[in-house]
Every structure is written in C-alpha cells, then in structure tokens.
Amino acid sequence: MKSVAVFLVSSLLLANAFAADVISRQRFIRIVPIYQRWTIAGDSTFSELSIPVLIYLPVRYNWSISFSGSQAAVKGDNFADLSGLADAQLSTSYHVESANLLLNFGVNLPSGKNALTLPQLTTSAVLSSNVFQFQVPISARA
C-alpha cells in the first residue's frame, strides 16, 4: 500500500511538468509488424507474426480519439496454427486544463475469434504465458 501511495504522489507532482503536451496535435497511423520466436527445451519452436495498428486523431486541442487492433499468426512444431484478428479498442481522451485532469474512456470491440478447437486453446494458453511476452498473446478475447 505504501508503494502505491508513493507512486500516486510522485505521479501527481510530475503531472504539471508534462501538462503542456497531454493531447498530441499530430494525427498518425502506426503499423509496426513484430516477429517473435521461441524455442522450448531445445526441441520445440514456435513463433508469432503480429501486426498491431494504431490510429490517433486529435479532434480539438484537448480532445482525441484512437483506434487500435492487431492481426496475428502463430506457428509451431508442437502447436496448432492459429491466426486472426485480436479484439479492437476504441478510446477517447479529454484534457480538463483548469483541473489538470486527463479523462479517458475506452471500449473493447469484440472482433477476435469466439470459439477455438482444443489444440488451438492449448496453443492460446501457451501464448498467454507472461514469460513469452507476445505482442498479441491471445487472439480471441470475446
């Protein structure tokens, strides 16, 4: 609890230093393909190619909208092939300058698979392990 309080207090103190550029005025589309490969116990290899997309649109100087989503494909020696869209996210941010407050609201848009076979479910369970840190750890979240 003490570390949380210290983090919150330090965050509040640093907020004024970064208040000038809370809402970026530059719109952009970011597409960053990522390839990750792992070998387990020297005999089982699996990999993921993911293509995350982020679209950011400033509506006004203190209000923005963003959309993000990913496509991923997984292949492996002892794993089922798995590919498809991950769920998309739509969010908006509004900066209340008088209170130095940033409000965020986001929704998850189910667009991923909603049913997996048993081998695909096993592959998805391995992918979601934090140790691998895959960009798109689970293709079905709905």
Image (cartoon, helix red, strand yellow):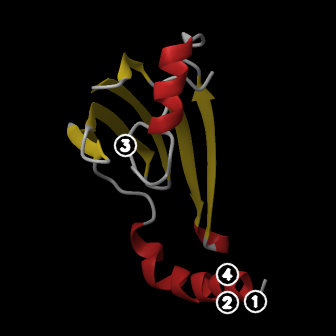
Q: Which residue is mark 3?
A: 135
User: Tag 4's secondary structure?
Assistant: helix
| Residue at image coords 45%, 84% | 17
Q: Is residue 113 visible?
A: no
Which image quarter holds the N terminus?
bottom right
- Evaluate whether residue 133 shows in this view: yes
Q: Dot 2 surroundings within 10 Å: few (below 14), some, or many (20 or more)?
A: few
Are circles 4 and 2 on residues that touch, CB within 8 Å?
yes
Decide if residue 92 is on the left or right side of residue 27: right
Pick whichever, 17 or 119, lies toward us: 119
Q: CA distance from mark 3 to mark 1?
A: 31 Å
Residue beneath the point at 69% across and 86% down: 3
The answer to whether marks 1 and 4 mark residues whose Cβ atoms lie closer than 8 Å is no
Residue at 26% of width from left, 36% of height from top?
Answer: 45
Q: Amino acid at mark 4?
A: Leu
Mark 3, secondary structure of its residue: loop
Q: Is residue 15 above or below residue 46?
A: below
Please state the horizontal and vertical placement of residue 66, each as a whole percent of the image. Answer: 44, 39
Real-space Cα separation, disc 3 to disc 2, in angstroms: 30 Å
Residue 111's x, y, as percent?
52, 16
Q: CA distance from mark 4 to mark 2?
A: 6 Å
* Image position of 18 (left or right of 38): right
Image x and y of residue 70, in percent: 37, 29
The amino acid at mark 1 is Lys
Q: Residue 127 lies in what quarter of the image?
A: top left
Q: Closer to the observer: label 4 or label 3?
A: 3
Residue bearing mark 1 = 2
> Looking at the image, is mark 3 or mark 2 nearer the viewer?
3
Q: Which residue is mark 2?
A: 6
Of 121 and 83, nearer the camera is 121
Q: Is residue 122 left or right of residue 56?
A: right
